[in-house]
Amino acid sequence: MVTDNPFTLARASDFTDKQINSLWTDLGSAKIINTIIEPTSKVSKFILGGKGTGKTHLLRYYSYPVVRLRSQGESGVSILKKHKFLAIFLRATGVDATRFEASSNIPINWQQLFGVYLELKLAEGVLDALCDIRDTSTEEVFNDSNFLNEIKQSLFGDGIDNCQSIKDFRNWIILQRRNIDEAVNDAAFSGNLELKAPFSIGSLCLRISKAMQKWNRELENIPLIYLIDEIENFSSRQQQVVNTLIRYGESLATFRVTGRRYAVKTQATLADGEENREGAEFKTTYLDSILLSDEIRFPDFAKRFVIKRLISAGISPRSNVVGPNEAFDPSLCFEEVQSSNFYVDAISRLNLSVNEVSFRKSFENAFMNANGDNPEAAELCYKVINNLTLGLPIVIQKLNILVFMKKMKKGVQPLPLSETIRTDADNFISPTIKSTRNYYTNAYGHYASDLFAQVCREANSNRGVVYAGFDSFVKMASGNPRNLLIILSKAFEISTFRGIDFISGQSLPIEFQTEAVMEAARFMYESDTNFGKDSDTALASVSRLASILRTARFSMNIPEVSPLTFSFSDDDLTVSAKKILQDALNYSLIFEMNEGRPDRNSQKLNRKIQLNPLLAPKWSLPISRRGDLSLNRETLLSVFDLEGSNDFDRILNKLDMKWNGIPKPVAREVSTPQRSLF
C-alpha cells in the first residue's frame, strides 16, 4: 500500500525545473496551450486566474531552463530555432518589491529605482540563457563585440567599458544588482541612499533583444519574452513600470504577465500618465474561463492530471477498467451515491434514519398558520398531508410537499390539488405507467439532489449531507487543479489512516469521502485564505451569504434555482460593500459569472456571483449551479456592508418565513350558505 501522499499540495514556485516538466499535464492539444501563452505573438498579454489555476506552472514550463530539460543533448541555438522563442521567467516576489516603496526619510525616486532593479533581474535571466546557449552551441559563431557595442550605447557607469565578453557583461549586471541590494539594506539603518542609475527605464531589458540579434545570426528572428509571475505583488506605482516596459517593448520584447483575476491595479504608464489599451498594447486572457470551456473538457483533464501525479510519485496505477488495454480511471476509486430508485438504495446504504414526523410537522404548522387554528382546518390538513406522503419514498414525499407549496395560490382548493399531485407522483414512480405530466418529471430533476440533502441532514447522523464521487470532486474544483489536489490529498490522508488503498484496492467509501471534502472546505476557509483584516471581513460576509443559501436549500419551498449563485444590481452596492465584495473575489471565495443576468424589469445586466464550490460542504450547499437567487438592496447590504450587516439576522428570519410558509389566504374546503342581503 502506498503511504507517501501523491497529492500533497505544493506550489509550482517550489518545484524544480525537472518537476515542472514531469508534472505538466496537457490541456488536450498543443494548440490550446499556445492560444493561452501565444509565444510568437508580438502583443504582450496578461494571463489572469484564481489561485491554483496553474499560472506559475504555465510560465515556468515555457521558460528557457525548463525547455532545455525537454531537449537534452541539443544545442541552445537548435532549441531556440525549434521553439522559435526565448522566454525568461521572473517571479515578482523575487524582486522583493516592498523595499522600493516610497519612504519620507529617503527622498529619492523609488519608482525609478524599482524599474532599474527589475530590468537588472530580467537581463540577468537573459544573460544566464545566452551563456548556456553559447556553451552548448560549439559549432556556432558568436560575436561578443557586436553584442557589447549595441548594448553599451544605452548604458553608463563604472566598469561597463571593461566588459570584453558576454560573461563579463553578465558579471557586471550581477554587480549592479548587488550594489542596489546593499545600498537599500544599508539605507534602512543610515537613512541615506546614494546610487547612480546605470541606465534609463527600458534601455537594458528591451535593448538586449537588439544585441542578441547582432550576437548570432540565428537569433535575428527569435522573439524575446519576459514571463513575470504574480503581478499582484507589485504596487500600483510599480505596475506602472511594467506597463511602461510593455508600451516601449514593441518590436523589441514582449511580456506575459500572470496574476490573480483582479491583480492588475492600473494600466497607467510613466509616459505622462498615458494608459495602455486592451487590444492595442496588450491582450488579456482569463485562465479560469478557459479551464472550464468545452474545448478543454476539464473532467478529462482532471483524470490525466491525477494519473500524471501518481506516475510522478512513482506509482504505476493499474487499469481498474474491465477490458484489454483500458486506461486507469480515477472515478472507479471512489464509491458513488446511487440516485436511482429515488435514493432509496442510497438511504439504506448510508443507514440514514429518516424522521418523517419532523418535516410533516413543519408542513402542518405552515398549513395551519395559513388556514387558521380550527378543527376544520386540522382535518383538511390531515387529508392533504396523507395524500402527499403516505406510502411514498421519502424524497418523493418531500417533492410533493414542495410542489404543493409552489402551486398553492389564492383560490386554489388544497384537497383537489393534493390529490392531483398524488396521482402525478404515483404515475411518475410507477414502472408501468409513462407519465405525461412533464412538470413533475422536471421538478424531480430540479430538486431531487437538494431533497436528498435534506434527508441526510434530518437523519440521525453526525455526517450530515454527503459528498462523494470523482465527478463531484471535479465540480468542486471548478476548473482549478489546486482545489482538486486539496480534496484528493485529504482523501488520501484519511484512507491511509483507515488502511484503505483506494488507488489499487477497494473504492473509498462515501463516508470517508465526505470527511475528506469537509476537511478540504475547512482548510480553505480557515487556513488558505488567512491574509489579515481584509480576508477576515470577506470571510464573514461570505458566511452570511452562505447562511442565506443554506436557508433556501433546506426550506420546504426551495427556490426554483440551485442555491449556490446570486445576482444583484451593482448600483445597490455602497462603497464599503464594493470593497468587501472585491476582496471576496480576490481571495477566490466567490466567482463572478461573465454572462450576468438581465433584470426582468429594466433589462439592465445584473452581476452574477457564485460561491466557490470548494467551500460549499462547510454549509451543506450544492456544488452545481442552476440559475441564481436575486438579492434586493436590503439583503445585499446585509451581506456585504458592515453597517448593513446589523440587520442580517432580521432579514434571514424573514426569508426563512417566506420559504417555509404557505401563501395567505388559502381558500377553505368547507362551504358556508350565502346569507340574504336583508
Image (cartoon, helix red, strand yellow):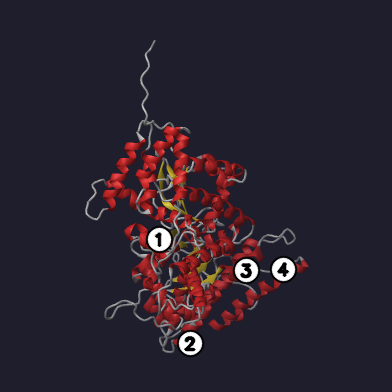
Q: Closer to the camera: disc 1 or disc 2?
A: 1
Q: Closer to the camera: disc 1 or disc 3?
A: 1
Q: Which mark is residue 194?
A: 4
Q: Position of residue 237 (x, y in %)?
A: 60, 58
Q: Which residue is mark 2?
A: 135
Q: Which residue is mark 3?
A: 96
Q: Mark 3 or mark 4, which has the lower sequence index?
A: 3
Q: Mark 3 or mark 2, which has the lower sequence index?
A: 3
Q: Residue at x 47, y 45 (%)?
A: 361
Query: Quick check: 65 above or below 530?
Result: below
Real-space CA distance between mark 1 and mark 3, rounded to the nearest whole angstrom: 55 Å
Amino acid, disc 3: Asp
Real-space CA distance between mark 3 and mark 2, rounded to the nearest whole angstrom: 31 Å
Q: Position of residue 652 (x, y in %)?
A: 54, 44
Amino acid, disc 1: Ile
Q: Taking the image as drawn, is residue 121 in sight? A: yes
Left-right relation of 308 to 228: left
